[in-house]
Image (spheres, grey):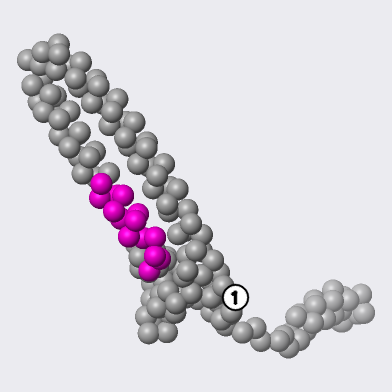
Amino acid sequence: MKMTPKALAPLALVAAFGLGNLAPHAQTPATKIGFVDVDALFAAHPSDKDIKSLQAAANKELTDLDAKIKAIDAKGTAATAAEKQQREQLVSTINAKSKSYSDQMAAKAAPVEKAVDTALGNYAKQNGYAVIMDRAIAQQSGLVVYADSATTDLTEAVKKNIK
C-alpha cells in the first residue's frame, strides 16, 4: 500500500492531538480531608449542658404522659368513658408538650450549631482542608473505607475554636 498525503492526513491529525495531550501538566497538591466527632464538638459548647438538661426534662415528662396513655390503652374496650376522655386529654397534652420542648430545643441548639459550623469552617480554611466529615456518619455510610485516625482526626483542634 502506498502512503499518500491524503491517507496520512487523518493519521497526522490523530497523532498531533495525542501528542498535544501528553504535554506535562502541573501536579496538583493532595486534597486534605479530615474527620471530627460532631457530638464531641457539640458537647464542648458551653450551652450544651442547658440543652441536655432540657432534653432530660422533656424525656421524663413525655415518658410519664406516654405511660399513662399506654395504661388506658391496655384496658382496651374495658376502659370507661371517663378514661377514654382522659386519654384524649393526655394525647393532646403530650402533643402540645412535645412541640413546646421541640421548639425550646431548636432555639437552644441553633446558636450551638452555628458556633460549631463556624469553628469547623474557620479551621478548615486556616489549615487548607477541602473536606471535613463527621466520623460516625462516614463510618456508618461505608463511604470511607480507611482513614488514619492519627492524621485525620481534627476533633480536639476544632474544639479549641468553639465559643
Q: Residue furthest right?
A: 5
The picture quadrant where one finds residue 38 is: bottom left
Does 143 appear above or below 80?
A: below
Q: Quadrant location of residue 126?
A: bottom right
Side (left or right) of 145 relative to 72: right
Q: Does the segment drawn in magenta span residue 71? A: no
The residue positioned 8% from the left and 21% from the top of the image is: 75
**At 73% from the left edge and 88% from the top edge, which residue is drawn?**
24
* Residue 75 in the figure: left or right of residue 110: left
Image: 13 above or below 76: below
Q: Secondary structure at mark 1?
A: helix
Q: Residues within 10 Å of mark 1 (few under 14, many from 20)?
A: few
Whole-percent x and y of residue 99? 37, 36
Q: Which residue is mark 1?
A: 125
What is the magenta segment's predominant secondary structure?
A: helix
Residue 101's x, y, as percent?
35, 41
Say if the magenta span includes residue 50.
yes
Q: Quadrant of the N terminus?
A: bottom right
Magenta residues, start to end: 44-57
The residue drawn where x is 17% and y is 28% is 69
Question: Which amino acid type is shown beneath numbered disc 1?
Answer: Lys
